[in-house]
Image (cartoon, coloured by chain):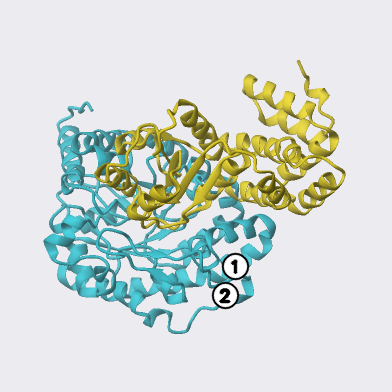
Amino acid sequence: MAELTDIKNELIRAEIDEYVGRPDERERLIAMFASAGPQMQAISAALIDGDHATVDGLTREALAAGTTALEVMDDGLIAGMALVGIKFRDGVIFVPEVLACARAMKAGMAHIEPILSASGAKPLGKVVMGTVKGDLHDIGKNLCIMMLRGSGFDVIDLGVDTSPDTFIEAVEEHAPDLLGMSALLTTTMPNIGRTIEAFLEAGLRDPDKIMVGGAPVTQAFADDMGADGYGKDAMACVALAKSLIAEGTGARV
Amino acid sequence: MTDPMTSRERVLAALNGMPVDRPPVVNPGSVMTVELMDLTNAPFPDACRDPELAARLTATGYTELGFDSIQPTSSIIQESSALGCKVQWEGKDNWPTVVMREPIFRHVDDIRIPPDLLEHPDTQCVLESIRILRRRFGDEVAVFGKAQGPWTLGYHTFGVEPFLLMAYDDPEATKVALDRLKEVTVLFGMAQVQAGADALVMSDHATGDLVSGDYYRRFLREIHIELAKRLPIPIILHICGKTTDRMGFIAETGMAAFHFDSKNDPAEAMAIVDGRIALMGNINCPDTLYAQGPDAVRGEVLRALDAGVQLIGPECAIPLQTPIESLLAIPRAVQEWQAAHDANQPLTT
């Protein structure tokens, strides 16, 4: 089993030591970073530090040196975001810091995505996402989309203020495996339930396919509204999407 | 037991830390609903833009629901609209919203306060509604004004994401932006004082869902102290989300009350503020008021009162589809609690 000292990058070592308390997560992160090369660790460290210029430069260098796009994404960018996600979930950092890290990840992904798209790799699943009608707050939804894409999902982003009809049209057009919707305001949260009702009325509701989130949304509210899953943050969203896909029968939303 | 008070006396006494005949029921956020719009023939968005319709819909908080305060600001768009932000007005069943994806400021030097800020129809609507309500209800019920604090104005004018990234990348520029934007809060707040508001709700959404308590300390504490000094009526600060990590700072601002969210345990919140500021809230809107109904509402009201929360009300603006029955359950539970309290017979939830 890998030890913390097997990680060469000092910042990553210190961050795990200070901020990752859960034994299973600690073990997973140590194994992940210890197996990554120094260049990938440097990309992760710059991302954790919110330094988009350095991530941009290191990603270019790594690809130019022959490291595969998949390796840079998994061992550099996603690995870094995994630690960022834990710090956010545990209240060590907040949205401004996450946005800075997300900006760094985007800087790296700008080089990676064209290569991966051209490779024709099969996505883990297709997800349609948007904020509900009347809600123009999309930071959380955008973080979820970035993490889902980084984790191998094909995401169709409907943007903000999405009416039930627009969700339904998107599902009919794209036939996704999952539908995600978010609300940031207590005043717009009921539109989650109204959208689900619209799917029921349209005869398009398939079990285990609708996931919801947003700062004031809770598991209890998601259950009340008839959603199939609730994710507290972007990391939980990815885990939920994987779990719903794994449980799914292949049927559409 | 204290002599019976009018609603206005009750609210002002509680805001000033004086004895009350029972804890007041208040609406620092809006309690307007689709049902009440139908009842008064004052639907959104017209009731957000026409002072008479706004006043008519607002009055139902007192006449139909039995709350001790009324406040005619139906959303949080007024100052931002007057600053030049685009507003999506929506229909009867949705709140107007600032279109933050089309920011009007990109740099701190872009910040300009139009000289006719208070002449804009959206700020005028609030001011005229306050005058109408003051004339109509005299000293019967407390009339709350509402102004957005500089942090919220930062979201609206710069966009949420750019504003938060500015706070991360360039704290000094952010402080300058807040310092300039706070003058909007003062202008609109003072105008509402002159229109007859008894107290001013100041929403400044430095919520724990977005930023840490340290952000509040670094960026807002001093500004809020200054605003509490400059605005000559009781100030009620509203911040959504988890806020226990900043309540200690908020308690030191000199504001009269903090309107807090159901994500915070009332007893823990009371312990943190330790009598330095009154607490107001914190009945959950989406789960309890909207989805669960009167029994759950009663339970939350009693829990807040048992913890010592001085003014009871929803945690935030309520969903427009919230049933009236849920809202009526708030004053009913407060009266029940007070009766039991006076008879020295504690209630069980």
Tell me the CA gap for discs 2 and 1.
Answer: 7 Å
Judging depth in this view, the residue of A67 and B150 nearest the camera is: A67
The mark found on residue B177 in the picture is: 1
Residue B137 in the image: state x and y as whole percent: 16, 67
Q: Which mark is residue B141?
A: none
**Residue A107 visible in the shown view:** yes
**SS at circle 2:** loop
Q: What residue is shown with label 2? A: B111
In the image, residue A115 sits, relative to residue A239, either above or below, namely below
Q: Which chain is yellow?
A: A
The chain letter corresponding to cyan is: B
Residue at screen point 48% across, 31% down: A245
Place of residue B117 in the rendered image (x, y in percent of width and height, measured from the top left): 43, 79
Q: Nearer the viewer, residue B173 or A228?
A: A228
Q: Quadrant of the C terminus of chain B?
A: top left
Picture mark count: 2
B85 with respect to B295 (left or right): right
Density class for disc 2 (Cα within 10 Å; few <14, some 14-19, many ≥20) is: some
